[in-house]
Amino acid sequence: MEDMSAVATTGFDRNCELHLKHLKLKGLQPKTIEAHARAIRRVGDYFDHQIADLSETDLLDCFTDLRETHSWSSVKLDLYGLKFHYEHVLKKPWVAPALIKPPRTQRLPDILTVAETKRILLTTQVLSYRAFLFTLYSLGLRLGEGLRLTVADIDGARERVHIRDAKGNKDRLVPLPTATHQLLRRFWQRHRNPVLLFPNRHGGLAGARAAKAPLDRGGVQKALRAVVESCGLKKHISPHSLRHAHATHLIEAGVELTEVQDILGHHSILTTVRYTHLTDRSRQHAIDRINALMDRYRLAKGTAR
């Protein structure tokens, strides 16, 4: 029995490697490939690594159980990953289980004010994290985009930053604020890594010059959580919240919506429009309009009965 299990595991591992090779050939982002790997291994663990001949009932049981502990997006990813595995690795027909998508809930993210953002940045004591978080905020970057920044991406003469391999495998150029440029220059003079703008901290600043990998994603997230807690903020804040704050603060400052769209790299202006609902300016504008409308109604006091 143990021998059969070992054989199944070996075959499963071999197929997983083949799966990832297919994804790389399609030119998918490393983050997407990593997500696929997690998805296949999660399904593999559920079926003791024997996933080559799953019935529709097997799949329905698996994904129903998975839905109890994971988000719908995780379920979809696992489902798509297994479908890809059957079609491209196992070369077998795929029978999709009849899953019903739960009702979509629209939740607005917590948005940091300018004062709260400043407090977070000033409370961050570790220089590499402070420089990185300010860069995310001031450029409106996603976490992965910031981690991938290199020295060559900074164009101080033209006051812009080249964001490479962003969402949808697209590049874009974003404005480089003077304050950000000065901070990055001072920070680079401390570590002097010839390639990476934010080298990892495994060897401290002394070892950062020879580092081959950027800051650890989990380390950034953990550091930000600790800072938010020390600031006493009750909002749910992640590195992506700094991107939300950037967009909201730009709109509040009067920057055109199409400019914000270009900076964030949104494919559709409708995605950017969502931020107008999160600004204090638009909220106050609505309140002023409502008050102006209601002030037209001068209702006489009624007679008590």
Image (tube, rainbow, N blue to C red):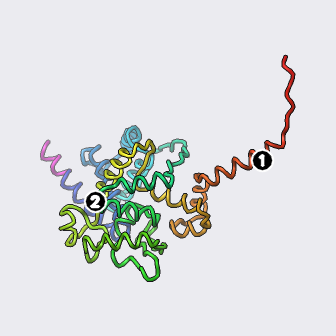
Residue 296, image quadrant: top right
The residue to which callout 1 is attached is 292
Mark 2 or mark 1, which is nearer the start of the sequence?
A: 2
SS for callout 2: loop
Q: Nearer the viewer, residue 47 or 242?
A: 242
269 with respect to 191 (left or right): right
Nearer to us: label 1 or label 2: 1
Measured as percent of width and height from the top left, residue 170 is found at 46, 72
Residue 186 visible here = yes
Measured as percent of width and height from the top left, residue 130 is found at 34, 60
The residue to which callout 2 is attached is 216
Q: Nearer the viewer, residue 300 or 211?
A: 300
Please state the extent of the stretch shown in magenta in the rendering.
1-8
The stretch drawn in magenta includes residue 271: no
Is the C terminus in the top left, top right, bottom left or bottom right quadrant? Answer: top right
Q: Residues within 10 Å of mark 2 (few under 14, many from 20)?
A: some
